[in-house]
């Protein structure tokens, strides 16, 4: 893990923003794990060699991790890893090995495929997860393996694949920072429109385009600047990274977390056998991504389960116009049924956000002009074989409280960040994020420097 910038804290319960900036490294690697002799590599020999070399990277995302999954994990020590979805014909081959904890793991199969490269014989697609890089630094990660081949059917399927991922992220990653990397099977010269489903649809940046090509994309229809299948020993990194691979890394910032990168590396030399041959038919691609927390908006850790639909009040709190809560209403009985906040902006306009259903009894706390919420206790429990939010209590800087639901033995208390807010303003609650349906299933606080 790369160095982090620390801020000394002095609170007796868990505090947000002990770390306000830092870096993490990512690696994308198609490990060619189809069963021999279908694989174009030698995975029974090479996968055990790949495994111990993944350790230097904070978040590794692999593709074609099919029939040699146990060998890939055998000599790896990342503490947070996805379980295999199965061998070829049954699994997607997508897995993540992380130094950071994650939630919200979803595996999504492509709606379209084209049989030319046997893409339809196994459920290829993408994965989504939300990784906690540090307190307050929640980042959405996507791993993908798109349709292969150069026939018209392949190109159309690939276009559909990337558009499907973009549509998913437009729902699940609203106002969240994003890192997307994996095997796109796409090049700008051939698949410009497909790639722009991500670039334009999600407002992400291709790190290779930004760092190596100074923001200039290869022209559609021009000859592909594809990398050779192998590089001779001693090939400089500048040459290895100048050519375009189908393995790509995209990033996007959010109001709460800024992501930047000024490095991208073809890790070919780190993944060679004793004879100097590559361990896969794809090059491993890495980047160091720098992150910085906003001094105006922060996310606290969410509590609860993974049912129902995502929501976020980040849309209420743009960095240049963070509102103040004027009142909060909670509904609850045996569990927390809904949360609702009314906010006011500096120009006097107002807005309301409500999440959950109409069950339970409502109670409202109207805040005074100099009053704001500085603490939230959230309790979860088991309901219908899943985890839900059972209880919420908020506390203001003046000691007033409001609660709903029933407390459990599994509670977490979060407080405002202790580092200085933007323009010297104090931190207070400005909204929530999580999941909800007829009740609140997952809940986290959003703090804003507006008090």
Image: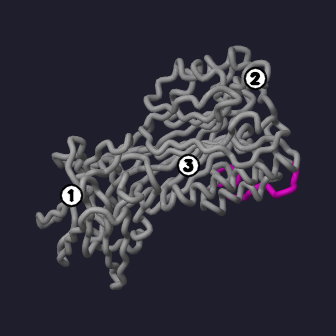
**Residue 156: mark in rendering:** none
The quarter of the displayed image where residue 146 is located: top right
Please state, as top left, top right, bottom left or bottom right, where the C terminus lies in the image. Answer: bottom left
x and y percent of residue 310 in the render? 46, 57
The residue at the point 31 percent across, 74 percent down is 342
x and y percent of residue 337 in the render? 31, 59
Q: In screen coordinates, is 12 left or right of 281?
A: left
Among the two numbered marks 2 and 1 on one chain, the one whose residue lies closer to the N terminus: 2
Residue on which disc 1 sits: 393
The answer for how far apart the CA atoms under marks 1 and 3 are is 34 Å
Residue on which disc 3 sits: 179
Q: Can residue 376 be seen from the camera position used here?
A: no
Residue on which disc 2 sits: 41
Q: In this view, does 200 lie above or below 237?
A: below
x and y percent of residue 253 in the render? 51, 58
Callout 3: helix, strand or loop?
strand
Q: In screen coordinates, is 168 left or right of 366?
A: right
Q: Residues within 10 Å of mark 1 (few under 14, many from 20)?
A: some
Q: In this view, does 206 lie above or below 297?
A: above
Q: Nearer the viewer, mark 1 or mark 3?
A: 1
Front residue (pair 174, 450): 174
The residue at the point 22 percent across, 59 percent down is 404
Q: Does the magenta stretch include residue 168?
A: no
The residue at the point 50 percent across, 42 percent down is 105
């Amino acid at each position: 893990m790369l160095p982090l910038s620390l801020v000394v804290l002095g609170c007796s319960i868990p505090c947000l923003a002990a770390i306000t900036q830092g870096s993490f490294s990512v690696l994308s690697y198609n490990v060619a794990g189809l069963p021999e002799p279908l694989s174009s590599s030698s995975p029974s020999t090479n996968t055990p060699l790949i495994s111990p070399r993944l350790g230097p990277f904070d978040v590794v995302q692999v593709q074609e991790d099919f029939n040699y999954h146990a060998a890939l994990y055998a000599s790896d020590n990342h503490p947070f890893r996805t379980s295999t979805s199965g061998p070829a014909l049954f699994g997607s081959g997508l897995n993540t090995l992380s130094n950071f904890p994650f939630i919200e793991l979803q595996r999504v199969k492509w709606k379209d495929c084209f049989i030319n490269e046997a893409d339809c014989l196994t459920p290829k697609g993408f994965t989504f997860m939300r990784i906690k890089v540090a307190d307050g630094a929640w980042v959405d990660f996507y791993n993908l393996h798109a349709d292969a081949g150069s026939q018209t059917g392949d190109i159309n399927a690939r276009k559909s694949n990337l558009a499907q991922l973009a549509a998913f992220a437009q729902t699940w990653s609203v106002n969240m920072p994003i890192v997307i990397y994996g095997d796109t099977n796409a090049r700008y010269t051939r698949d410009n429109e497909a790639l722009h489903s991500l670039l334009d649809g999600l407002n992400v940046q291709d790190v290779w385009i930004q760092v190596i090509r100074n923001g200039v994309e290869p022209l559609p229809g021009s000859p592909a600047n594809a990398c050779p299948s192998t590089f001779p020993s001693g090939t400089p990194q500048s040459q290895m990274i100048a050519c375009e691979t189908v393995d790509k890394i995209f990033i996007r910032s959010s109001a709460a977390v800024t992501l930047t990168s000024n490095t991208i590396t073809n890790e070919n030399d780190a993944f060679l056998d004793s004879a100097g041959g590559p361990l896969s038919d794809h090059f491993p691609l890495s980047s160091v991504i720098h992150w910085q927390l906003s001094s105006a908006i922060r996310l606290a850790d969410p509590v609860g389960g993974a049912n129902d639909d995502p929501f976020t009040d980040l849309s209420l709190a743009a960095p240049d116009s963070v509102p103040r809560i004027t009142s909060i209403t909670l509904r609850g009985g045996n569990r927390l049924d809904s949360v609702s906040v009314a906010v006011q902006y500096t120009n006097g306009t107002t807005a309301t956000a409500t999440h959950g259903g109409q069950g339970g009894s409502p109670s409202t706390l109207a805040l005074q002009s100099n009053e704001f919420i500085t603490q939230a206790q959230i309790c979860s429990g088991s309901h219908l074989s899943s985890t839900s939010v059972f209880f919420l209590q908020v506390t203001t800087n003046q000691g007033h409280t409001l609660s709903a639901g029933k407390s459990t033995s599994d509670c977490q208390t979060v407080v405002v960040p202790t580092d200085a807010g933007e323009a010297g303003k104090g931190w207070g609650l400005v909204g929530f994020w999580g999941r909800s349906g007829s009740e609140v299933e997952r809940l986290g606080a959003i703090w804003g420097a507006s008090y």
